[in-house]
Amino acid sequence: MSETAPDRRLFQITGADALTFLQGMVSNDVLPLAKAPGIVWAALLTPQGKYLADFFIIPDRDGFLLDVPADQADDLLRRLTMYKLRAKVEIAED
């Protein structure tokens, strides 16, 4: 289990479609994370472009970690799970 600040939470996104799932969901380009280490700051927006949450995406050996402010975490987890549909991804709190 990773250590995190008390005002942050971590979610792990794993599975064959993890990268394309995130690419289609967030405001920034995450495809460079497949080729080189790094961190991407991104946001989740409504279809109309309204802000819902922002977070850091960090590559992990099994997929990606999302470092999220604690006050946005529950809603973000609910929305990601809702939009997952048939994507081959698993979303879990780390």
Image (cartoon, rainbow, N blue to C red):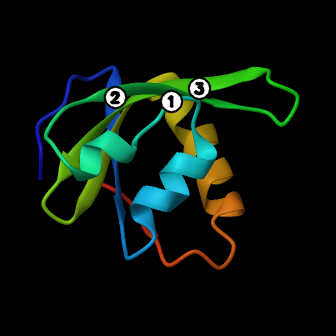
Q: Of helix, strand and loop, which one carries label 3?
A: strand
Image position of 66 (left or right of 54): left
Residue tagged 3: 53
Residue tagged 1: 28
Residue 32 versus residue 61: which sits nearer the camera?
A: 32
Residue 93 versus residue 50: which sits nearer the camera?
A: 50
Say whether residue 26 is visible. Answer: yes
Q: Quadrant of residue 9?
A: top left
| Kind of residue sitting beneath label 1 | Asn
Query: Does residue 22 sit above or below 5 in this rendering?
Result: below
Image position of 13 (left or right of 37): right
| Kind of residue sitting beneath label 2 | Val
In the image, which is nearer the foreground, mark 2 or mark 3?
2
**Mark 2 burial class by Cα count in 10 Å: few <14, some 14-19, many 20+:** some
Query: Along the polypeptide, which appears first: circle 2 or circle 3?
Result: 2
Residue tagged 2: 40
Residue that appears at 84% across and 37% down: 47
Q: Of helix, strand and loop, which one carries label 1?
A: loop
Q: Whole-percent x and y of residue 44? A: 62, 33
Q: Whole-percent x and y of residue 52? A: 68, 26
